[in-house]
Image (tube, rainbow, N blue to C red):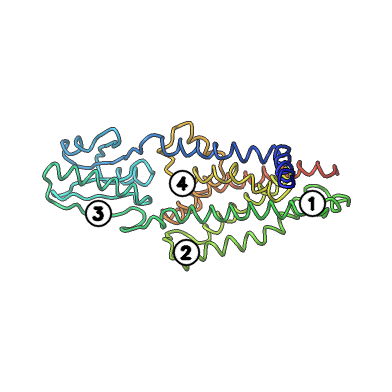
Amino acid sequence: MRIRALALRIIRQFVRDKRTLALLFLAPLLVLTLLHFVFDGQSIKLDIGTVDVPAQLSERMKSDDVNVASYPDANQAKQALEEGKLDAVLSVAGGKPSILLEGSDPSVSKAVMLVIQQTMQAGSQAVQPEISYLHGKEGMSAFDSFGPVLIGFFSFFFVFLLAGVAFLRERTTGTLERLMATPIRRYEVVAGYLAGFGVFTLVQAALIAWYSIGVLGLYMEGSIWLVLLINLLLTLTALTLGTLLSSFAGSEFQIIQFIPLVIVPQVFFSGLFSLEAMLPWLQKLSYIMPLYYGADAMRGIMIRGEGLADIQGDVYILIGFSVVFALLNVFALKKQRAI
């Protein structure tokens, strides 16, 4: 009887907690659905530019997954490569072929090399091409490619989680309620909490960037200060988002329930999985994911050596996310007490 009574109490408790039931039954379905669309999307298409390459060789390279475009000279082809329109440039000068790879994604570089090598072997081309890289280097590891994304992800994830739990504790212990009873304004409360938490997010951003680059030896082409800037903006976005969602949670467990709904989808659109392989309508979801912009900027800085002018779009969008979430935090405080 005691076992039955205990089991019934647990069942009633779960039935009353609709959010937990949704997490238990719907969240796995959401994640599996996203995985289905990510891995069952369209195939990745390679874009290869050619300069002074025999027409027969260019035609043999073409397929449903390989687009081949001819350029009048090497400078125009290289410019297209720098603009991200091409994955590689194959040119022939003095009868000797050379390949210039974009290089920021090792998997794409390997796929391009496989296509070109198979094409040249089929044409009985015995000359080995000279290989060079626009970005990255030969033998660049998968960790070098995904490392910038992982820096942003872990910074975002832990700040989101800790900020949400810490701000929730302020509410559940009555600290925030007592603070709201004073003449302080809502925006001052939000600004104060963000400034206080922000000190630690700044330290965390610097520590993760230093450890990844200085200790783990992650490939680094650009400015460390820009890496710190993007990492700080990502953690600020996570901080404002975490404090906002904590307003809709009643316990630490409910904060964790937001992870499958808020954090996991961002992983799929951060660059760890190829966006080009996803269906077009699914790719558009990345535009509402802060981590997409942070990861794009981090890879641009660390792998392609981009400067502030190249990543300013990502910077402005991350600032915009932080401002919007901070304003929503101000409105969410109306639940405590209107000032």
- What is the spatial separation of the Cα atoms under label 1 and label 3, in whole angstroms? 61 Å
Q: Bin the neighbour count of mark 3 within 10 Å (Cα to Cα): few under 14, some 14-19, many 20 and up.
A: few
Front one among 104 and 167: 167
Disc 4 residue type (three-letter): Gly
| Sequence-first disc among 1 and 2 | 1
- What is the spatial separation of the Cα atoms under label 4 and label 3, in whole angstroms? 26 Å
Query: Could you say where residue 172 lies in the image, as x and y percent from the top left?
Result: 79, 51
Q: Secondary structure at mark 2?
A: helix
Pointer 3 residue = 131
- Specify whether 75 is left or right of 223: left
Contact (CB < 8 A) between labels 3 and 2? no
Identify the residue at the far top of this view. Answer: 281
| Sequence-first disc among 4 and 3 | 3
Contact (CB < 8 A) between labels 1 and 2? no
Pointer 2 residue = 213
The residue drawn where x is 54% and y is 44% is: 266
| Sequence-first disc among 3 and 2 | 3
Pointer 4 residue = 271
- Specify whether 97 is left or right of 284: left
Contact (CB < 8 A) between labels 1 and 3? no
Identify the residue at the far bottom of this view. Answer: 215
Q: Secondary structure at mark 4?
A: loop
Disc 3 residue type (three-letter): Ile
Mark carried by residue 172: 1
Query: Could you say where residue 200 lies in the image, as x and y percent from the top left?
Result: 66, 62
Q: Bin the neighbour count of mark 4 within 10 Å (Cα to Cα): few under 14, some 14-19, many 20 and up.
A: many
- What is the spatial separation of the Cα atoms under label 1 and label 2, in whole angstroms? 39 Å
Identify the residue at the far front of this view. Answer: 1
- What is the spatial separation of the Cα atoms under label 4 and label 1, in whole angstroms? 37 Å
